[in-house]
Image: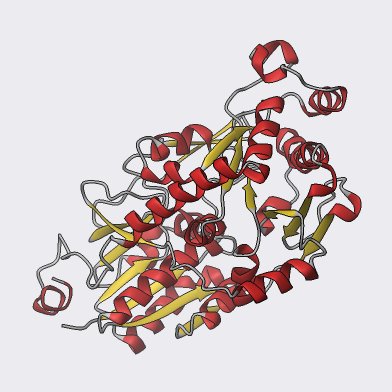
Amino acid sequence: MSGRILFLCLTPKGLGETRHAVELASQLRAAGHTTHFLAHECATKVLQDAAQPATIIPDHVLPMMQFFLSGSVRNFRPDAIVLGDWFTTTLALERSGQEFAAVFGGFDVPIYAIDTWCSARAGHVIDLYGTTRRPFPDWRPDFAGRLEPVPMGTGSSDAVPFSVVPEPLKLARKVRRHIRRDLNADDRRIVLVCTAGWQHAHYEDESARRLQQALPRLIGLQLRAFGSDVALVHVGPEKLDFGLGRQQVWLPTMRPERFESLVASVDLLLTANVSASTNVRAIADGVPILVIGGSIRAATRDDMPPEFLHDADEGQREWLDASLPAFPFHLWPLGYRRFVDPVLADNPYTSALRFADYLDLAGMREQLGALLLDEATRADARADLAAYADWAHELPPVGRLPPARSRSEPLVADVLA
């Protein structure tokens, strides 16, 4: 039996989370449900591209969230509300000075939430910049159900997993050659680096700014070792200087169709965000992925394992001296290392990725060389990507929301059970 489901995507920064919500809505619509979005204005383009009906909230009126939600409930008459992401919804309400209970307490509609960070397994405190700790909001016991997007999710005991790994793009060889020729890299290996707006933001914390500046320089330093055999393509809202001169190309954020074709045309995705939505696109298309992170805290070289400095050349050591102190991270330049580690533990997602510690200078360069130039290594990586994509695609689409635990109204039970 079909139902009417209202999605809320309130954060001005969480476009990856919004895309997860759009995918879940698409699965529910395919099963006959009707969906509508109430979303922050930054999500407009994502929703338009997905042809999802939506009511858009301008940023300056976000403090009137209850007014907009009341109107949507009155006009759309939802059988259920789904928060596009529990954590970013909490942040959006905090930023606008609103309490969750005050905004949602007056509606006799079951509330579900997408749990992007798999809070049942994640750390209870988010580590930021190596020095700051932010409590992660407790899961609300009055929520009707929890939904976990795969690949970060695996489906905890009380969560419904849903795959956001797309089908592979069937890109003609002629189109791929044309894209590579336009990048002046038709006979070179192409490394793709993608960044989001929050990674370009100005951070007050000195450690965050240091890491923010250090990583692009390191990437350029490492890729220069391969000479003209390698080209770097950066897609992001602002240009970053990797120090590669004509070997690097910057492309501003682009339409989804063009971006998907670009990802399918490159040889390696290099990312410093283990949770980036671009990763799932690369998984689908069989593009090897090297995730750069930081695993240790180091004030000086003496704090680093000796093997991290093995065979480091003068340029690498100069970079290191300018980049320390360092803190652990999974999301550049924020941190999130201790918070995300439990989510990645025993997660099949990690089998599709290759990892390098950014302070392991020789190890990172070795990984880059193998994934770019060694055909056996590339074949192994593509096989792991294909195996993981097959596993994710075998997850059944979400045709209904789980029964609302704390609700017994006939309408809710009939529609959602």
Percent coordinates x, y for residue 104 in the rendering: 35, 66
Judged left or right of residue 248, residue 33 is: left
Q: Residue furthest right?
A: 245
For the point 74% across and 15% down, the residue is 301
Judged left or right of residue 18, residue 416 is: left
Vertical placement of 190 versus 325: above or below? below
Q: Give whichever of 25, 382 is nearer the camera.
A: 382
Percent coordinates x, y for residue 93 in the rendering: 49, 60
For the point 38% across and 79% down, the residue is 70
Quadrant including the N terminus:
bottom left
Q: How is the image coloured?
A: secondary structure
- Residue 302, picture quadrant: top right
> Does residue 299 appear in the picture of this structure?
no
Percent coordinates x, y for residue 374 in the rendering: 63, 41
- Residue 404, picture quadrant: bottom left
Q: Give whichever of 329, 84 is nearer the camera.
A: 329
Percent coordinates x, y for residue 68 in the rendering: 45, 78
Q: Residue furthest front?
A: 376
For the point 77% across and 53% down, the residue is 232
- Residue 310, picture quadrant: top right
Quadrant including the C terminus:
bottom left
Judged left or right of residue 394, residue 322 is: right
Judged left or right of residue 394, residue 169 is: right
> Does residue 345 appear in the picture of this structure?
yes
Q: Residue furthest bottom?
A: 75
Vertical placement of 378 versus 91: above or below? above
Vertical placement of 137 versus 279: above or below? above
For the point 32% across and 54% down, the residue is 391
- What number of labels is visible? 0
